Amino acid sequence: MPSIGPLELAIILLIVLVIFGPKRLPGLGRQLGSGMREFKDSLTGKDKDDDDEHEPAKPVVRQQTIDRTAAEAEVVTGEARPQDQPATRAD
């Protein structure tokens, strides 16, 4: 029975590249990898919920976000804003 050599493998990869294009190949690789992982896990009887029970809970770290709208609103234009003008007195 003949085996697949490097030349045949290169031809197959070239055909796949022509059919799907370079933009879709990383997504196809991810899908293939996750499908193989799910298949392997189903054969071994491993479930995603089993992993959560054995691992300790990781603390959730939340980062504070800076409100950039206030900082971006202060653009120096050389003109005085209406709220910076002195109050006028109506006599």
Image (cartoon, rainbow, N blue to C red):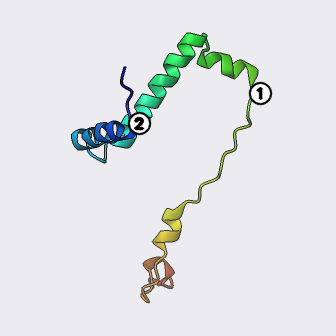
Residue shown at the point (39%, 42%) measured from the top left = 26
Secondary structure at badge 2 equals helix
Residue ranking furthest to the left: 19
Asked where in the image residue 54 lies, by quadrant, the reply is top right
Task: Using the image as rendered, state which of residue 83 and residue 44 is in the foreground.
Answer: 44
Residue 29 is tagged as 2
**Quadrant placement of the N terminus:** top left
In the image, residue 69 lies at what x, y percent?
48, 63
Disc 1 marks a residue whose amino acid type is Pro
Q: Is residue 49 above or below residue 5?
A: above
Disc 2 marks a residue whose amino acid type is Gly
Nearer the camera: disc 2 or disc 1: 2
In the image, residue 10 lies at what x, y percent?
33, 42
Residue ranking furthest to the bottom: 78
Residue ranking furthest to the right: 56
Task: Using the image as rendered, state which of residue 53 and residue 3 is in the foreground.
Answer: 3
Q: CA distance from mark 2 to mark 1?
A: 31 Å
Q: Earlier in the sequence, mark 2 or mark 1?
A: 2
Residue behind mark 1: 56
